[in-house]
Image (cartoon, rainbow, N blue to C red):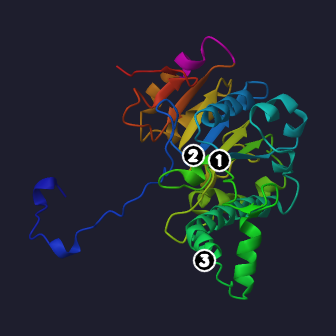
Amino acid sequence: MTDDSITTLKKEPKATIKLIKGSAFAYETASHLPKLHQCMIFNGKRGAGKSVAATNLLRMYRETGSMDRIIVISPTFESNIKLMEDLDIDTNDVLDPENPDVIQQVKDIVNSERDMFLNYLRLKANYKAFMKQMGNRLPPLQTDENEDLMLEYYDEYSDSFKIPEARYKCYDFKPPRPPVISLFIDDCMCSKMFNDRSFPSIVTRHRHLSSLPTGGAVGISLFIAIQSYKASSGLPKVIRNQATSIALFRTKDRSELKQISESFSGEVDPEKFERLYDYATRDSPHDFLFVDLHKKDSQESMFRRNFDEYIILK
């Protein structure tokens, strides 16, 4: 069938598709940083620098105010005290990939952050009415809710009633927003988690975790460091298909590089992709080609050498 044989007979305006406001990338980030939410893959052999690159990116998000809490799943990360200090990671947020409940632990953390955010908004909204009632010396209604409010507003240090301090600055933004949470998965290939069906589930649903009553969700950004893109013990295809970006380090396995280039053939043909990769990784074993499938309009290119050099295709 040729294009000439296709005819539009009549428009049907009542059936026009309307776009719903919103975005897969819900949170603002600095102009030089990738959008959030992310599902970013760091692919490279052992010692290439995947963890260094990932933690540096997380640090940049932290320093620019667009990352509030970082969860780590790794059997080795807790031993790296320096990285934990730089990223302000609580030791309780470093989880074990061999724990069969590790994915549920992540969901519980995100749910608790959602609940704390909503509770703060509730207390802030009710504060004026509560203080008015206290100022008028009206006898409070004897309900569990009123007793709870008195306990939540009372500050024992100042012996007065006040709104509890916001857990994050973003609580008081205009409009307020929930915290931005990331999950860094490092050195977890061959772990129980990689073979758990709940792992692909949280990846495919990462933007929708912990829904909000006003619409949207808290969600979580994923940063996954792996040594092999398509090995039997590597990332399942369903997870690879969720990738919004990839940091690709030098590899001697040209067949794997070919497979990766074919995965991105919708954006650039495999031959050009391999030329970009060779250019980005030629000078150092720790350099990488960064491919951002959803770059910002203001950014020069979807391709970078590391994070700090745009590669412009002629």
Outermost residue, bottom side: 142
Quarter residue 17 falls in: bottom left
Q: Give the residues drawn in magenta, as a range.
A: 277-285
The residue under label 2 is 38
Q: Residue 197: tell me if it is visible.
A: no
Q: Residue 16: tell me if it is visible.
A: yes
Is residue 117 rendered magenta in the image? no
- Between marks 1 and 2, how big is the CA–CA gap? 6 Å
- Mark 1 is on which residue type? Leu
Q: On screen, 159 above or below 168?
A: below
Q: Position of residue 29 (x, y in %)?
A: 51, 39
Q: Position of residue 255 (x, y in %)?
A: 62, 32
- CB-based contact (under 8 Å), mark 2 and mark 3: no
- The circle on residue 300 is none
Look at 73% across and 27% down and name the residue there: 52
Tell me if 196 is positioned left or right of 16 in this view.
right
The secondary structure type at the circle numbered 2 is loop
- Mark 3 is on which residue type? Asn
The secondary structure type at the circle numbered 1 is strand
The residue under label 1 is 222
Circle 2 residues within 10 Å: few <14, some 14–19, many ≥20: many
- CB-based contact (under 8 Å), mark 1 and mark 2: yes
Look at 48% across and 52% down and name the residue there: 174
Disc nearer the start of the sequence (1/2): 2
Q: Nearer the viewer, residue 177 or 311?
A: 177
